[in-house]
Amino acid sequence: MSKYNPLSDRLAGHPANEWQASFAEIEEVLGFPLPKSARTGKSWWSGMDKPHARAWSAHGFEADVDHARSLVTFRRSETAPAAVATVLPPVGEIPPERVEAPVPAPATVDAATPRAAAGSRHRTLGMAALAAGGVAVVAGLGALLMKGLRRRT
């Protein structure tokens, strides 16, 4: 579960193809302040591989930031499929042979999907890199300590 799910939920339920929001409005939806990089840089708002960017890209939106006005315009991309509302009659009115299991929304995709598996691989590689970095730091500190001890003797 991402801390950006409230923004994802807000955009999932947005009926129009565009939503213009101030930084304050986005922070109100999220329940926490935006990072400094979101307020000052354009790169935070671009790229689809970041957890915060998936909050809007999962629903076909692209973000356009105007730092001078502290505004973000979320627009549905031209290639994104239009949101379609499906109204089904109550279950008792559908013959049992016609009842189908609901298809999960993109935000609730399970770990069996390639995208979720890729995210899991990235996390695993990230943790391995973090562990290797930690080992290198400890080894470097040990080497410095030994060097310092040699000078004293």
Image: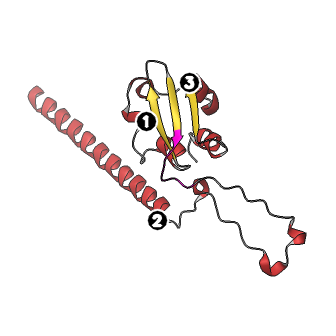
Q: Is residue 34 left or right of residue 30?
A: left
Mark 2 falls on what kind of element? helix
Q: Is residue 138 left or right of residue 152?
A: right
The residue indicated by pointer 1 is: 45
Q: Is residue 56 left or right of residue 103?
A: left
The residue indicated by pointer 2 is: 114
Q: Which circle marks residue 22 in the picture?
A: 3
Give, as a single range, the part of the protein colored magenta. Answer: 75-81
**Tag nearer the camera, 2 or 3:** 3
Task: Determine the main secondary structure of the stretch shown in magenta.
Answer: loop
Q: Mark 1 or mark 2, which has the lower sequence index?
A: 1
- x and y, in percent, of residue 134 in the image: 31, 43
In the image, residue 124 above or below residue 21: below
In the image, residue 127 above or below residue 35: below
Residue closest to the far right: 92
Which of the pair 15/146 is nearer the observer?
Answer: 15
Rendered residue at 85%/64% (across/down): 89
